[in-house]
Image (cartoon, rainbow, N blue to C red):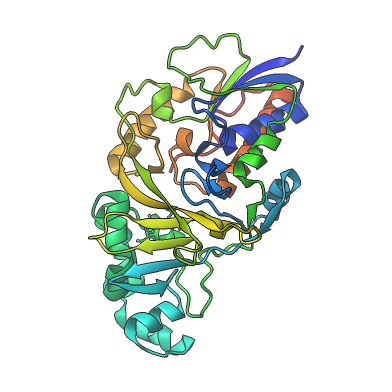
Amino acid sequence: MAKKYLIIGAGFSGSVLANQLVKNLDCVIDLWDERDHIGGNCHTERDEQTGIMVHKYGPHIFNTDKKEIWDFVNSIGEFRPYVHRVKAMSNGKVYSLPVNLHTINQLFGKSFTPAEAKVFLETLADESITDPKNFEEQALRFIGKELYYAFFYGYTKKQWGCEPTELPASILKRIPVRFNYDDNYHNNIFTGIPVDGYSGIIEKLLEHEKIRVSLNKKFESGMDISGYDHVFFTGPIDAWFNFKYGRLGYRTVTFDTFYGDGDFQGTTQMNYCDEEVPYTRITEHKHFTNWEHHDKTICFKEYSKETEATDIPYYPKRLQQDKTLLLKYRNDAELLQKVSFLGRLATYRYMDMHNVIGESLNFAKSFLEADKSGKTPPIFPNIEQ
Ligand code: UDP
């Protein structure tokens, strides 16, 4: 008899899982999402006024080094070449990001060669910091205070709402530093943008008669889910437990949308690094799809703030108190039967799309193996660190 599964959340984690289960197992799947669209925070849609494909929850660029994940997403929908080139406004001037030879030469008014820039940066780096323990120490250790204050201090304070000394060094490690003129924001081998948007990809993942998608359907803690053989939860783990130990910390973002003619800023993303500017960045969506032509333009001015009960969680803060709380929820989750937790919100991690997809594919594999051999299925895709 066909198994009956419930997946909560129609973002990449839930949708990849639904796709894999239905392809490999005799099952029917109910997939709920509390919003009125699929795609979670990767959701894209064409703006009514301009026809431009808009990243409704901020810029998402697909990057990966893993060929199998690149092949997987390309087997679902068409991706076109796109290289993310971010510019940064600091103290009234525009610079190249991530920090590269051009940025160093621009900021210090030099014409260094790669070797000269390397030596120069070593004179700026604070070598007394041997084991960087937080974001600020990591920055001072590797790029020195001039670059740190020009590009990272103000932006990070606005983005995270706290001093960079309170944040883990791992956040800064997301961004490379280069001693050449390569200004690709990412370091990955494969990169692109889906022609029909991310929601187009997710729609295809869910195109199956045995997947029944219900939008505007919110999971409430304590709902009767006993009719399902297994439930997969991709929402915030604290919400599953009705926040009984308290709420995990997230930053959320809000957008001011504005329109114009032609080209507003000449690039997809301009970061505003000064603390006094209230927003963190402006995204101009038409630049994601340079193969399309649009006379008009639509931009999002992005603001960051603390997440309240009704806000959409974006960036997990992962401060010490959050990690303590997370462990309590994870321990409780381990005691549940027939429930698994996966994805960015259910595992409370800062995850890129390719990691979410890769983890969901692996999780589906483990689940299928467990099902076949009659073993207990995995509860989490990861071990908490
Ligand atoms: N960051 C910064 N200045 C910038 C860009 C990034 O200080 O101009 C810091 C900031 O703390 C941010 C982190 O680097 O949260 C990671 O940046 P990334 O661009 O990866 O953030 P995302 O695109 O995921 O928001």
Relative to 265, residue 72 above or below: above
Visible residue check, residue 365: no
Horizontal side of residue 242 vs 294, given as left or right: left
Q: 355 or 89, which is in the foreground?
A: 89
Q: 68 or 216, which is in the foreground?
A: 216
Q: How many marks?
A: 0
Residue occupying the point 53% across, 33% down: 342
Relative to 293, residue 128 above or below: below
Give the position of the N terminus as an image quadrant: top right
Residue occupying the point 32% across, 64% down: 273
Relative to 82, residue 7 above or below: above
Counting from the top left corner in percent of width and height, residue 317 is at 34, 44
Counting from the top left corner in percent of width and height, residue 2 is at 75, 15
Residue occupying the point 31% across, 50% down: 160
- Answer with the quadrant where ligand 1 appears in the image: bottom left
Horizontal side of residue 40 vs 15, given as left or right: left
Give the position of the C terminus as an image quadrant: top left
Based on the displayed image, in which of its 4 quarters is residue 378 positioned?
top right
Counting from the top left corner in percent of width and height, residue 100 is at 45, 76
Counting from the top left corner in percent of width and height, residue 231 is at 57, 20
Based on the displayed image, in which of its 4 quarters is residue 205 positioned?
top right
Q: 92 or 364, which is in the foreground?
A: 92
Q: 61 or 382, which is in the foreground?
A: 61
Residue occupying the point 51% across, 62% down: 262
Visible residue check, residue 356: yes
